[in-house]
Image (cartoon, rainbow, N blue to C red):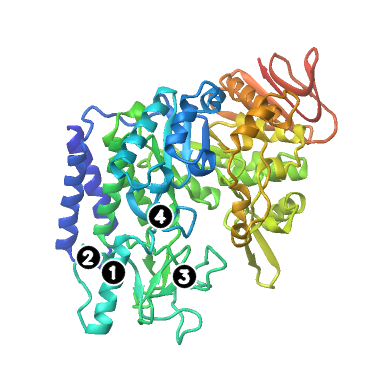
Amino acid sequence: MTGTDELVSKVTNFYNNLYKDCPDFSDDVKTSFLAKIIDEVKKSGIVEAAQATSEENAWYKTAVGYSMYVDKFCGTFDGLKELLDAKDSTLPEMGVSLLHLLPILDDGGADGGFDIKDYTRIRPSLFRDPGDKEGNTETFSAFLAAARERGMRVLFDVALNHCSVQHEWFETAVAAINAHVTEGTPLPADPAHPFNFFIWTTHGGPGYPTSPAYDEPNVRRIFSFEPSNWARVGETPYFYLHRFKTEQPDLNYHNPAVLLESVKIIAFWAHAGVGGLRLDALPYLWKVDRQKTHERDWVCENESGTHIIVQLWRAIADALRPADDALLLLCESNQEFEEVAKYLGKPGAPPECHAAYNFPALTRMWHALATQSPATLIDTWNEVAGLARPDATWVAMLRCHDELTLEKVAVTPQIRDDVTTVFLQDPSWKFRVTEDSEGREIVEGISARLASLLKNDRDWWTLAIAVQLSLPGIPMIYMGDEFGMGNSPVTPEAEVDSRYLCRASIDWGQVRSERADPDSWTAFCYGTLKQLIATRGNLTGRAELKQVGGHVLMVERGGSVCLMNYSDGEVSVEAKGKVLFAKNAEVGDGSVKLGRYGVCWLKK
């Protein structure tokens, strides 16, 4: 069987499983769009000799990631390429091999780039000449090539669960509704018409005569400041579903025309040469009408249909690139760890994403810092580690770029209370505030940079970074953390969305000046991180996590052992070997004395 035949077989099976019990469109329509999807992939160029990624050829399993807002990092892609070309470029010097560009696609400006209005165009403002579309395409291609020359692949965010109200699809759909209401024009029945790309109801939200069945308590609102999961189209009786902001209408994957468009987007960027796509809001793709009524009592988190869609995307992504240059599909799913692991594909099951954010470990890393005990981190890691396929991996991060997330679906109330008690140092840092059944405030996120959370404490900062880098997978550094940047002052933007406290631009003149002083906080953070990343190359294979003496986390990987003391006191541990990295640690004959938040990595 050729690579093309194998892919057609996989896509056909996934497609038929997805739509077999979906009555929204006729069998003829479903058959037609299956043929269109297969034609689209063939047109994009299948790698006939492609092999599935494996534990041995998965380039991403040894990657070191760095996430940035391009405009805050250096203004434009022109400037970013110049920084990469500079002799003192910090990214290749640190050992970064995966650049995660936070939203760069053309957007409506409502949600930091996640309300996409053109899936195949980079935001014009990220270039020195915003009006030069052809030249900007060439600039982006030159940037991708420059990154590759320096050993870095490029990953960026794509939200395929929803788009922008400014997207041509939605604007066309609204025009059809207005024509229907004012002129009596029939609503489009053609699945290829964008009206059918979205989910509609004529039942109103709060403040209107009736409330859609999709609202709480049936389904949570992700953004508490939104009054409903439904938004009204002007003064018409039509409401559209949005799980996130009003400006982000959800797409309707019950319509195979939407699935076709998603395949076109993935194929476009695979052909453009990007290293990967971060799939935002992945758990919400497939909606299920539980009651089979026109109110659509939707449930849309972690449905089986969502997993089938991701399996289809993965099959296509793997077919378009050789295995040693796989198009990395990165899952963003802040859910309980059993649910997150499913997006990597269970052992023996079809693969889904190549990697996933380890939200469960993120919260437990902060819980360990707050309680001076690694117990919950170890328990969670041990539960998560064996749930995914061996060719998949986790992303280890200390925040989801600009937020220490504490969402209800991923943490217990006790963990949230312990973390917020220690690290929520300013009320302005609160993000995603909700209430429990008794009206008590729940803070589901803290908007703060690493240095601010850890109070510029060098020992604490080193401990946090060392734990992150000791774990297998892709460590993801957030821009500015390498220089010890703290939260910016509260601005009008930050009063509405506290995450803007963590989105200040990097002042490169200041950074260079402070790095020149070896005793400065900036020089300390950069030097320590650079040293730990270089040393991390000695850590290979899977990790075994143990708790030693109550306060010490021991991470054993291959022939290396990492000891990290969560206590602010002194602790002794039996261990020996060649010192790879040490801070606040004394290595004796068969034992290591760890001081306050001490770290010691050894080669056995």
Dot label at residue 107: 4
* Nearer the observer, 532 or 154: 154
Tags 3 and 1 in contact by the CB under 8 Å rule? Answer: no
Amino acid type shown at disc 4 = Asp
* Nearer the observer, 575 or 363: 363
Q: Quadrant of the N terminus?
A: top left
Residue 109 vertical position relative to residue 514 in the rendered view, above or below: below
**Distance in Å between CA atoms under marks 1 and 2:** 8 Å
| Helix, strand or loop status at disc 2 | loop
**Distance in Å between CA atoms under marks 1 and 4:** 18 Å
| Helix, strand or loop status at disc 1 | helix
| Helix, strand or loop status at disc 4 | strand
Q: Position of residue 429 (x, y in %)?
A: 68, 55
Tags 1 and 2 in contact by the CB under 8 Å rule? Answer: yes
**Distance in Å between CA atoms under marks 3 and 2:** 23 Å
Of circles 1 and 4, the one toward us is: 4
Tags 3 and 2 in contact by the CB under 8 Å rule? Answer: no
Of circles 3 and 1, the one toward us is: 1
Q: Earlier in the sequence, mark 4 or mark 3?
A: 4
Is residue 412 rendered to the left or right of residue 329? right
Q: Earlier in the sequence, mark 3 or mark 1?
A: 1
Residue at (39, 60) in percent of width and height: 164
Residue at (55, 31) in percent of width and height: 472
Dot label at residue 229: 3
**Distance in Å between CA atoms under marks 3 and 1:** 18 Å
Tags 4 and 3 in contact by the CB under 8 Å rule? Answer: no
Residue 586 vertical position relative to residue 49 in the rendered view, above or below: above
Q: Position of residue 174 (x, y in %)?
A: 31, 71
**Which residue is identified by label 1?**
173
Amino acid type shown at disc 1 = Ala
Q: Quadrant of the C terminus?
A: top right
**Which residue is identified by label 2?**
193
